[in-house]
Every structure is written in structure tokens, then in C-alpha cells.
Image (tube, grey):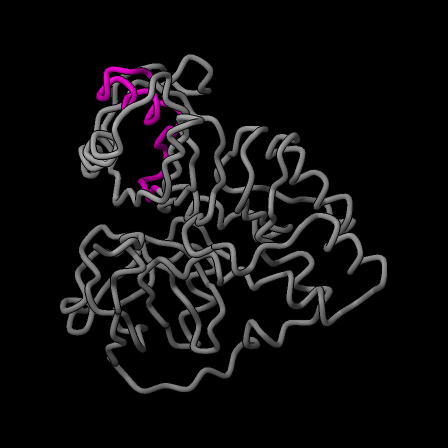
Amino acid sequence: MQYKLPFERVKRKVLVRQKAKGLVGVSPDERPVKRILNYGMINIDKPAGPTSHNVSAYVQQILKIKKAGHSGTLDPGVTGCLPVALGDATKVNTALISAGKEYVCVMHLHKTMPLADVKKALKKFVGTIKQQVPHRAAVKRQLREREIYYIKFLEYNEKKRDVLFTVGCQAGTYIRMLCHDIGEELKCGAHMKELRRTKAGPFNEKTLVTLNDLQDAVAMSDEKKLRKYIQPVESAVEHLPKIWCVDDAIRLVKNGRSLMCEHIAELNDGIKKEDDVAVLSLKGELICLGISNYNSKELLKRKGPGVRPVRVF
């Protein structure tokens, strides 16, 4: 079984509609530090204790910028990947909120159960499940469907009755409720004891930055470390299919116009009608997030509006 989020399983090819050179803008990796401080992403290793809002506020204070916003709230006691968008990059958070997530969880069983039964119960929750929104959640309490992409059993401490597992899931899945429901399936009861997020869309533990590391880099004016810690805003759309446009289209899209099919230079295969897509310049800069009016094959041949902009950068 592949323990990967859906977008990680897809290898997209690049299709060429027309050959063109990108002369407008700069490559994301060549942006000056002052620019990335107000137009980048930091994958913060959230500690236990502060809220996600608190962490975003700390980042804002450390970098002395006007705005910072996190993508995908973590409860105060939960640790791990918390992507924080800086300044003008906060508009990209809409693309990340709906991206798949991965967690490592410690579930405590209320009674000792055989290992075979525990593994069997975990497997039953892979696929489409129904969850009751918990009382403490900030959304309407109702039964809703969520997709569990995979559950990987890691360890069972029978003496402590603790089960360690990794779960990849659709955004909006409540792991606390998942543990409760697994306990119901086992007929012994269970609750979430510890939780750490290891993936939030394209962000994972390989690029984590602690608040202390960030503060030290700023205090020492260490440009090399800041460039390492602050990723281009484009890193937040790695999970989306992409369309590259010619230079002439950039100004039009910036002014709210749809991206015309005739202005597409290259695109990923596998795009479906109504899919969320990221539109980039030929320099690789994010122009907008949008919704495709056609599938990939049609975008290669048709004329007229191809992508409806939703967030323009």
C-alpha cells in the first residue's frame, strides 16, 4: 500500500500548447530577501501550548511584518507542520486549507485488546467514513463524510494500552473523533492521547522551522538561513495542477480577466473541468489560483476563457 497523499501519487506530465519565452518578472528563487519576507511561506514546527493564531502572531512579530496567517488550525496541544503565509502571500492559504493532511497519533485504549483486533479495526477506517463534528469544533455540529487515504500501524504498547499509527486524511478530518470511533469499533473505548501533524499539503517535516531558529536568524541578520527557512509562495501550490501562461496574459489576469486558452504556453496533463489550478508565469511566478473551464486536452485546442481566476497574486 502507498502511504502517500493523493497528490503525491500523481506524476503529472507537462504538455506544450505553444513555445514561448518568459521575460516578465523574476524566478521565485531570485527574489530579494525583503520581498520574500512579505511574500513567502514558513513551515513552522508548532510547539504544544500556543494556539495556531498565537504562532502566526509570533512569526509576524519576529519578522516585523504587517500580516501573517496560518493554514489549517491545530489545537493548542497538537504539534507539527503549520504553514504560515507572510504578508501578501496570505491569499494562498485558501489552496492549502483544502489540501490533504498526515498525522502521527498516539491512541489510548480504555481496555487491553489483542494486537490482531487493533490492526483489524484500523483497517476498517480506511476509505470514506462518517464523522460527527465534535462539540468543541468551530463549525456546525453535524454528521459528515471524510476520506481516510491510509492508516499505517506503527506500534502497540500493550502494557500502557497505547497504539501508535500514521493517518493520511482529507482536510477537515477530526483525529480525536477517529480515535473515539475506533474505540467504539473495538468495543473498549479509546481517546486521542497525542497528535503531531507531519504533512499539510505539500509541506512536510523536511522543511520544518522552529520559532527559536527563525528568531535567531533574524537577530543575526543571517540572509542564508532566512532564504532556507522562508520558502517562495509557489511552494504552497505544489499539490495543484499547473498552467503556465505567456507574458501578455499576466497583466490581463492581474486586472481580473480570465486566462484565455490562446495565452496558455504549457499545462499539466490530467486537469479536469472545474479543477482548482495554479496559473504561473514562464518564470515560475504564481499569477493566480483559478478554476479550469476545460480538461487538459480541451485546453490544448480550444479558444476563449480557459481559467476563471479566484485569487490573483
Name the image quarter holding residue 147. Answer: top left
Q: Looking at the image, which residue is at 27% across and 76% down?
A: 14
Q: Where is residue 193 shown, x and y percent of the image? A: 47, 26
Q: How many marks?
A: 0
Vertical placement of 133 versus 298: above or below? Answer: above
**Is residue 170 on the magenta stretch?**
yes
Side of 35 relative to 43 (left or right): right
Which one is nearer the viewer's eye here, 237 or 131? 131
Q: Where is residue 265 shown, x and y percent of the image? A: 31, 77
Side of 304 relative to 23 (left or right): left
Vertical placement of 179 versus 212: above or below? Answer: above
Q: Looking at the image, which residue is at 57% across and 52% down?
A: 43
Q: Which residues are magenta?
A: 167-189
Q: Looking at the image, which residue is at 58% across and 62% down?
A: 231
Q: Looking at the image, which residue is at 22% across and 21% down?
A: 185
Q: Where is residue 7 shown, x and y percent of the image? A: 30, 57
Which one is nearer the viewer's eye here, 135 or 259? 135
Vertical placement of 115 versus 97: above or below? Answer: above
Side of 12 relative to 297 (left or right): right
Looking at the image, the residue that sits furthest to the right is: 220
Side of 50 relative to 141 (left or right): right
Q: Where is residue 284 shown, x and y percent of the image? A: 46, 73
Which one is nearer the viewer's eye here, 187 or 265? 187
Vertical placement of 141 versus 169: above or below? Answer: above
Which one is nearer the viewer's eye here, 114 or 106? 114
**Is residue 258 on the magenta stretch?**
no
Which quarter of the rendering shows the N terminus? bottom left
